[in-house]
Amino acid sequence: MCNAADADKIHYYCGDHSAVASTVVSGKYESKWGAWPLIRHKPTTVPYEQPATVNYYAQTKVSGSTSNLCTGTRTFSVKNIAGATYSWTKSSGLTVVGSSNSYQYTVQRNGSSNGAAWVEVQISTPCSGGSATSRINFTVGIPQASNITIWNSISSTTVGHPVGFVAGYPPDNRCQLLSANWQVNMSANIVHGDFECGTDNGTSKNIFFQSTGTALVNVKVQNACGWSDWSMAVPIQVNSGYYFMVSPNPATTTITINQRGETKDDISEIKIFDNIGNLKKQSKYGGDTKQAQLNISNLRSGVYFIEISGNKIKDRQQLVIQR
């Protein structure tokens, strides 16, 4: 570097050790031992007590926002180095605004383009004898359905049992999305999930499937530019599992308990417990009771467990009260 004032001090040390290849300067490695500063060095040098040489290198990392670009312009920059030349390039989803031969580079979304985007710069200096290249990645436009991922906690379940789903959108943080809509190909109740963002945007849900078969779950998400198409569907197998059906679940004021077709036992008692095991409601029934209704309007919103007893069997399910 011709002018040390334009650059950052980099220590070189002697020896041989393992290190990480530098993404900033080709052919160099980087390591950090304890409280020592970050060391950029040759592949065969090692941090030691006394530096063999001290060189100066300019920081070439591109600075700028990596959030989704919808409207307006965005400016990226690198260190302004005296005597350096800058050669910028970009992905096809962007157009250049203004000059492109300085340490700053301004772009905007190219029409209605969507998807991955990048800006790259090659920096050359008269005394370095080479150049350094740096790139920054981000996205433009509406979310792309092909980039949406759905994580679910299990691949098979039973009717009435909650299954957690989370929608992600790499490379963006899913919590930056504005909203999400879920779709299921069979009867199901969709409620708040276990991994909600600070401001709930719908990307985390618990789904209660109400019939047996292969459920297909997909989602579409929204950012400042608009809505994506529906994602690829995630299959989950739903089996019978329970002797009795509780509906609706989630519930508001009243629930109905019915025998399933294969159940040969009558309903003799129903108990509702809170999520730490305290009995909150109890009701007993006479013989030949194949359907029962229970008023739950005095219970607060939350997650409960309902225990349904027959003369020979006992069934325990999760019940969600949501108002």
Image: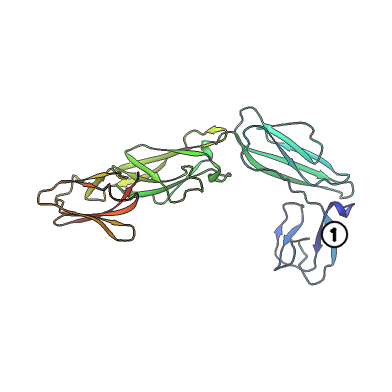
Residue 137 in percent (x, y) is at 66, 43
> How far across and how far down the image is residue 234, in percent?
42, 42
Nearer to us in this view, 107 or 232: 107
Outermost front residue: 298
Q: Residues within 10 Å of mark 1 (few under 14, many from 20)?
A: some
Three-letter residue code for mark 1: Asn
Residue at image point 27% right, 46% down: 297
Identify the image quadrant of residue 172.
Answer: top right
Q: How many marks?
A: 1
Give the residue at x 25% y 44%. 254
Inspect this view and state whether residue 259 appears: no
| Residue displayed at 30% across by 45% down | 249
Q: Is 263 or 245 nearer to us in this picture?
A: 245
Q: Residue furthest top?
A: 111
The part of the image, by quadrant, that contains residue 185 is: top left
Q: Nearer the viewer, residue 292 or 174?
A: 292
Q: Is residue 5 left or right of residue 221?
A: right
Q: Residue at x 74, y 48 (%)?
A: 61
Q: Residue furthest left?
A: 287
The residue indicated by pointer 1 is: 55
Where the C terminus falls, by quadrant?
top left
Q: Is residue 4 visible?
A: yes
| Scheme of image coloration | rainbow
Up-down relation of residue 113 to residue 62 (above or below): above
**Residue 188 percent across, percent down from the top left:** 33, 41
Element class at badge 1: strand
Nearest to the observer: residue 41 or residue 268: 268
- Residue 35 x, y percent position in the rendering: 71, 68
